[in-house]
Amino acid sequence: MSPIPNPGVPLRPLRALAWWAVDRWVQRAFPEVPTLTTQQLADWLSQGNAPSPILLDVRRDDEFAVSHLPEAHRAANLEAALALELDRDRPLVAYCSVGYRSARLVAQLQGLGYSEVYNLAGSIFQWANQGRSLVGQGQPQAQVHPYSPLWGRLLKPGLAAPLRKGTDG
């Protein structure tokens, strides 16, 4: 049974505290992994003159199918990323739901000599929370797969796509 939120505590500060905890968790688990903020990535993608990064979505098939960043390649693990035959001269930016799975992939790629590889801080959840563009099935999308009911609470109201029955992350 889930605890009932205290009606006197607004969800916004609780979500901010939860994000702080998630960010610390990822940083402690992967201290050597360089990160980009969603604003830095958005600026980079909008420049057009610099070599644009290859975007790697590190989520499962069902998550990717709901929505993803435009032009992202799905690479759920190191083997899948290497199968893409990534150009070592192009920068790479990996993301997942909140940044843990993608940080793990970035660390693995760094271990193989990829030097310009970054983890997207807050990943697709923060990207969506900030109203940035998403696509799915070739169409603009407004929702994100929540990974699980618990993790979906990090998304702003209305952004979590409904989970199919029996799906819990």
Image: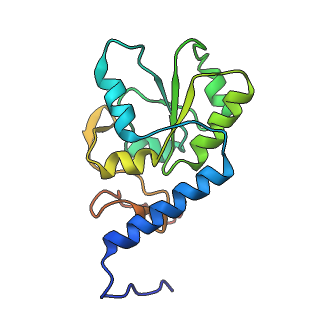
- Relative to 146, residue 90 above or below: above
Query: Residue 77: in sight, yes or no?
Result: no
Determine whether, in the image, residue 61 is placed left or right of residue 130.
right
In this rendering, the count of numbered labels is 0
Determine whether, in the image, residue 164 is placed left or right of residue 159.
right
Coordinates of residue 80 in the picture (x, y in percent): 63, 29
Q: Residue at x 57, y 22 (%)?
A: 116
Q: Residue at x 46, y 61 (%)?
A: 19
Q: Residue at x 38, y 34 (%)?
A: 40
Q: Residue at x 31, y 16 (%)?
A: 48
* The quarter of the displayed image where residue 49 is located: top left
Query: Residue 61: in sight, yes or no?
Result: yes
Coordinates of residue 30 in the picture (x, y in percent): 66, 46
- Relative to 12, residue 94 above or below: above
Coordinates of residue 118 in the picture (x, y in percent): 54, 32
Which quadrant would the C terminus be assigned to in this image?
Answer: bottom right
Coordinates of residue 3 in the picture (x, y in percent): 47, 86
Determine whether, in the image, residue 1 is placed left or right of residue 141.
right
* The quarter of the displayed image where residue 8 is located: bottom left
Closest to the observer: 155 or 44?
A: 44
Q: How is the image coloured?
A: rainbow
- Relative to 22, residue 92 above or below: above
